[in-house]
Image (spheres, rainbow, N blue to C red):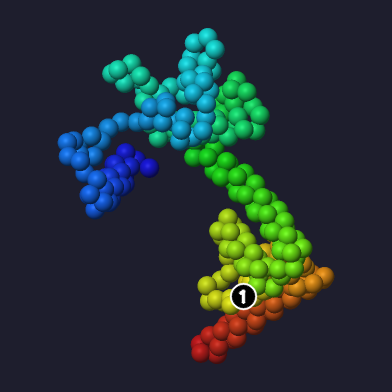
Amino acid sequence: MDEKNLWGHKDRLLEACCSYIEQLGLDAGGESMGQSRRVGGWSISEVEALIGLSRRDIQRACYGGQGGVAILSPQDTTWGRRSYDLEDLAQLYVVKQYRRQGLSLPEVKAEIEEQKEAGKSIEDLLGVQVSRLKEQAEEVTGQLLQAEALLAAAKGDEGTSLEKLVSRHLGIRSALDPSLSTPPEKNPASSIETLLYTPGLIDSSGVALAMDVWLGPGSAEMLRSAAEAASLRIQSNGGEHEKIQSNGGEHEK
């Protein structure tokens, strides 16, 4: 996001905050929020709180002397303190993700430099992290669905509770992977219809077990077969439709 758009969003946020505070009657006078707004980037304390990367790692990632690795070079302010802009924030976020994977800071620097030499930008590095985190989220939500489905069944609380669990999971799964979203024109009335209209969704993490616990052994396989058959029929009908249109066009000529 460029600086102009960034400040545009901040202005709207500031206006909303001021309006809300005034409505609550909390304006005690003195300097207003608009007058006290700080222009510039983030401080190291703010970066630490926002990203969750330790102060020591931030300092080492930005320091080129002994003990530092100089992955990035934030701008120094007139007060001699570093100010971190949006690109710095993004790079430090990538550093944090690599650190979570067990890499040391020198290893993180080597990895980032290798990616940059291959022509990768910070946007590319962030895209890799988004994909990786989505995969992790899909796996975790699938395991959660399995655990909750088994717990509901163990409590004898099946039926509606299990359907709600499956419905919630399908919504999350489709949000994580839009390619698995049900076509709008289908407008499914239930989780079962959603699975029938969206081939492949039944195979996403946790869904098969939940369906078998909910509807009985073999239910997931039955839904999978039905969804595949429906998909093939739709494709076949589409081909026939195109053939009819083509023949009609030729007849008109």
In the shown orientation, is residue 209 left or right of residue 240? right
Residue lying furthest top: 66
Q: Which residue is mark 1?
A: 190
Residue at the extreme left = 30
Q: Position of residue 144 (x, y in %)?
A: 68, 54
Let me know if residue 18 appears in the view.
no
Q: Secondary structure at mark 1?
A: loop
Give above or below for 239 relative to 115: below
**Residue type, label 1:** Ser
In the image, residue 207 lies at what x, y percent? Answer: 71, 62
Quarter residue 11 falls in: top left
Report x, y in % for residue 81: 35, 19
Q: Quadrant of the N terminus?
A: top left
Answer left or right for 21 relative to 48: left
List the single residue furthest toward the right. Answer: 217
The residue lying toward the viewer, choosing from 72 and 50, is 50
Q: Residue at coordinates 48% horizontally, 20% vertically from top-left?
A: 59
